[in-house]
Image (spheres, grey):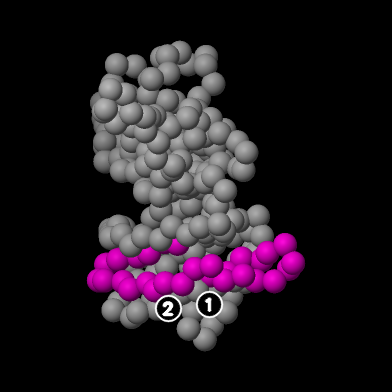
Amino acid sequence: MHLHNVIRRILFLVALTLAAGHGQGADGADKPPPPRSLRLLPLGESPPFRQIVTDGVRYEQEPEPGSIPPRQIRFGEGDKPTLLRLNLGRATEPIKIPAGTAAVLLREATAPNDPALKPWLTLHPPETGDVLAVLWRDPGTRWTLPRSLLFADTAAALPAGSIRIVNLLPVDAALIFAEERVILPPGKALIKPLATGTDLPVQIAFKNATGQFQRFYSGAVLLNPNERAQIFIHRADGEKPRLPAKVVTFNETAPPPPKPQP
């Protein structure tokens, strides 16, 4: 009888251990990480406005194919993919993408639903965290072959009260903040804190063919509470641009910082 009781006690302890492990999985320890967000920011210039007159009526002409990004792209296959509208110089609404290292495939909304076809754009985001993908095209190319650069889009990477400046030019850019001067190499970013309500003058120059810095932008950044700002310096891709460089700048509400883990 004593041996029987010992066996019953052992079986009872084993059952408790299995139940505890199952409970941890239910609490989320074994669940996959939650999805995160992706935004796209296409940079460039719209082609000149063109129209024709037929029977006294003016009709706007569609831009030449490839002169602007697709008006809509889609993420995901099946009956309910996520559609995303692209506008030059404006960040898209965030879309949810899974965590992990799998590539993010983006297709033109009108493209056939065939996974074997090459996507319009393939992104390789980091394993975790929200992402901002900046898109542009090289001179002489179409928007059928976009370039991309990924940036962390979390509150930790770019919190409220800060500015991110990105140089997408193939040459150095000089940044002048009041009395401070910083050289930003190609493809690099600078994050600078800025107190709420402070009006920060910003001037930007690019290194021209003679090796001199040519100033082409002058503005200011002012942050409201809970705001952050981003400045992107990129190549002008319009027809016969007066200057080879352009600037896109915008303020936005920063996402709240992550809640502390209990």
Residue receiving disc 2: 201
Q: Secondary structure at mark 1?
A: strand
Q: Residue at x 38, y 64 (%)?
A: 229
Q: Amino acid at mark 1?
A: Ile
Decide whether residue 211 is among the magenta residues.
yes
Decide whether residue 60 is among the magenta residues.
no
Determine the CA span between mark 1 and mark 2: 8 Å
- Numbered label attached to residue 176: 1
Q: Residue furthest front?
A: 56
On the image, the x and y values in percent for residue 168 come to 57, 55
User: 231 or 140: nearer the eye?
Assistant: 140
User: 222 or 1: nearer the eye?
Assistant: 222
Count of picture labels: 2
Compared with 193, 98 (above or below) is above
On the image, the x and y values in percent for residue 62 come to 39, 29
Q: Residue at x 47, y 59 (%)?
A: 247
Q: Amino acid at mark 2?
A: Pro
Query: Do callouts 1 and 2 mark residues in contact (Cβ within 8 Å)?
Result: yes
Quadrant housing residue 140: top right
Q: Residue furthest bottom?
A: 179
User: Dominant secondary structure of the magenta stretch?
Assistant: strand
Compared with 246, 145 (above or below) is above
Q: Is residue 105 visible?
A: no
Quick one: label 2, few (<14), some, or many (20+) residues within 10 Å? Answer: some
The magenta segment: 204-231
